[in-house]
Every structure is written in C-alpha cells, then in structure tokens.
Image (cartoon, rainbow, N blue to C red):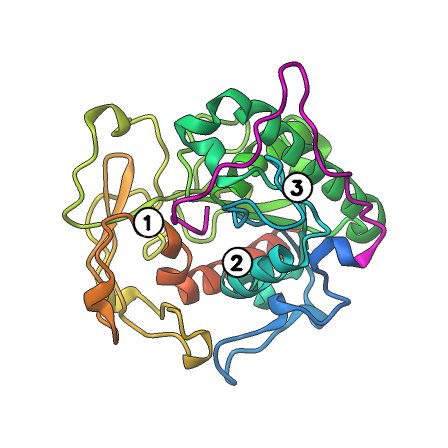
C-alpha cells in the first residue's frame, strides 16, 4: 500500500455475490503500466547520470505495484479497481511506477501489469468480510499477466520479481505457483518482497538472501522510525528481514554512509546520499528520521511509503549486481 491515507469504503457486495470489473486483456499494451517497448514512468531516472539500460538489459523485471486504489471513484465503486479508471491509472503511473519500478531499469527490462487491485479498505476491519475475494480477484490478474509475459516476452531470460505491499502478497503467491519446485526456479535472480511480512521459511527452495550477490533468494523489509515500539505479537521472529544497506540479516546498524542515495517527493531532484541508516530489530527495519525541506510535517513512525525510496540507489545497485552474478554463473 503506497498510500496510508484513510480510504472511503466501496460498495459492499450483496450476500452471495461479488461483482468485479471485467478482467484485463494483457495483449493490449494499455493494460500494462510499464513495458520495455513503451514510453512510461518506469523509464525515468532521477538524474542525468543515471541511465535507463532496458535496451541492452539481459534480464527481465516483473514488478507488481502496491495499493493505489484507496477510495471510491466516479467510474468504480467496487472492492476491486477498474482498469478503465484513467485517473487511477495515472495515479499508479506517477507514484509507484515512477518511484519504485524505475529503480530496476538499470538491471532489466521492466514489465509492470495493471491489475484489478483490491481497495485499501480490505486491509482494515471494514473490509475483512471481502478481503479474500478481493485479493483473489487481484491475484488472478497478476497470474494472468505473468503467464502472458512468460509466453510472449520472456524467451528464457533470467527474472527479477519485485513488489511492494499488496503487490508483495501477490508476488508470494506467484513464486509459490510458478517457481517453487519448478523449472522456472532456475531463471529466478532474486525476489524483492518489500512492505509486507514474509516468513523466513515461506518457500521450500527460495531462501532468504544473506549476501549482496546471492541469487535464487528473496529479500524483505518493513521500515519504521527508530522510536517505533511494535505490539509484541507483531514482533514475530519467524519473519524475514534483510537490511537494504548491507544486504545481510545482521542486526548491527548499517551506517548512513552506506546509503548510496534515497529519493524523496522531488524525484527529479536526484538521490540524496546518506539519507538514513538502517538497523534490523526483530521483525522490522528501523531508520532515523530523514532530514529534508518540510520534514517537520513528516511525523509518522511508519515509513511504509518509503520502503523503497529511502534506499533507492542501493536497491538499484543491488539488482544490477545480482544480475551480473547470475550471468557469471551461467
């Protein structure tokens, strides 16, 4: 969920019914937020010295975006977003595709499907009754998009799976359905499963990454301000946390000097080196409050919206390093 704003509640389906918008046809380029063959926000970089290398990339990135559908809209009042909602599509493009998917254009060709994302409300009590149905509908699209990608675009190339929040929930299912115990596992470079809790032993044959160049593994973290105190039941030691500055599971603090550059609300302002430090404590990743113009209004202890942005350059560099390591092994 890229947004943490309060959401208005969509129309609750009648008992025994769950109306949804029509499914997308992934043969149509308009049903993709990013393709390497189109001009889109995943092609952007925050500085002239940072290049979009998709044209020469030897790997692919399948990116699953987080929740942007956070309220009822003029053309869609259902629990799942309509892909005909142009305003919502624009919001997806200018937020998560720009700030998150763009990270990976230096490591691979970026494919990011639009999908009938579940409304933000399903993650709160007022959406509990329809949560499974809404998320299943969203995942059906993600799986269909991935299968279309495999059939028409992949051509046996190595793959990075990258996701955030709701997207990570779908990525977990996708890895279980298409990679675990299957031949496609051999094409997996790494999975970035960010913004949701992922168990260390979630997958039988995809371990937690403990080294910055390890491949065939996954990384995960959820970011909070250093003074955040979680409820004890949330601090589950079975949850995987990888530090995106050291790319290990060590609990020692990785200093801000290791931060190659975070990207804040002014994307074109370029990465800010040394933005935050990072430290694993239990099931969470902690950082200091970053210093930037207007930071007095940045009061949240939950840095979910910045899970990628605080470590933008480090994730970009790491994705490229893992691609090169994978290719050397082949």
191 above or below 291?
Answer: above
Crowding at mark 1 (Cα within 10 Å: few <14, some 14-19, many 20+): many
Comparing 142 with 242, the one in front is: 142
Q: Which residue is mark 2?
A: 96
SS state under label 2: helix
Residue 170: image quadrant is: top right
Magenta highlight range: 1-29
Residue 87: image quadrant is: bottom right
User: In the rendering, at what x and y percent does residue 315 appear?
Assistant: 45, 59
Q: Which residue is mark 3?
A: 116
Main secondary structure of the magenta stretch? loop
Which of disc 3 and disc 2 is earlier in sequence?
2
Crowding at mark 2 (Cα within 10 Å: few <14, some 14-19, many 20+): many
Q: Which mark is residue 243?
A: 1
SS state under label 1: loop
Comparing 120 with 172, the one in front is: 120
User: In the rendering, at what x and y percent does residue 304 appear?
Assistant: 36, 49
Q: Is residue 267 left or right of residue 117?
A: left
């Amino acid at each position: 969920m890229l947004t943490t704003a309060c959401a208005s509640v969509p129309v609750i389906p009648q008992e025994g019914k769950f109306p949804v918008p029509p499914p997308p046809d992934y043969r149509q380029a308009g049903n993709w937020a990013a393709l390497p063959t189109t001009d889109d926000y995943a092609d952007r970089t925050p500085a002239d010295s940072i290049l979009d290398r998709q044209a020469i990339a030897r790997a692919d990135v399948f990116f699953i975006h987080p929740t942007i559908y956070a309220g009822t809209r003029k053309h869609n009042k259902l629990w799942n977003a309509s892909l005909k909602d142009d305003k919502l599509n624009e919001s997806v493009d200018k937020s998560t595709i720009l700030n998150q998917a763009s990270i990976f254009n230096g490591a691979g060709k970026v494919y990011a499907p639009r999908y009938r994302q579940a409304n933000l409300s399903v993650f709160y009590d007022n959406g509990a009754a329809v949560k499974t149905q809404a998320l299943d509908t969203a995942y059906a699209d993600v799986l269909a998009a991935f299968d279309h990608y495999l059939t028409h675009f992949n051509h046996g190339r190595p793959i990075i799976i990258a996701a955030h929040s709701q997207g990570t929930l779908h990525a977990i299912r996708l890895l279980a359905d298409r990679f675990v115990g299957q031949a496609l596992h051999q094409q997996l470079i790494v999975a970035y499963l960010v913004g949701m809790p992922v168990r260390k032993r979630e997958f039988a044959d995809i371990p937690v990454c403990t080294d910055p160049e390890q491949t065939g593994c996954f990384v995960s973290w959820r970011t909070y301000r250093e003074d955040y105190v979680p409820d004890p039941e949330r601090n589950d030691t079975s949850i995987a946390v990888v530090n995106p500055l050291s790319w290990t599971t060590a609990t020692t603090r990785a200093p801000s000097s290791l931060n190659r550059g975070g990207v804040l609300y002014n994307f074109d302002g370029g990465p800010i080196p040394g933005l935050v430090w990072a430290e694993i404590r239990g099931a969470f990743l902690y950082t200091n409050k970053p210093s930037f113009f207007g930071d007095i209004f940045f009061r949240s202890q939950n840095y979910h919206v910045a899970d990628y942005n605080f470590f933008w350059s480090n994730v970009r560099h790491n994705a490229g390093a893992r691609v090169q390591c994978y290719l050397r092994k082949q």
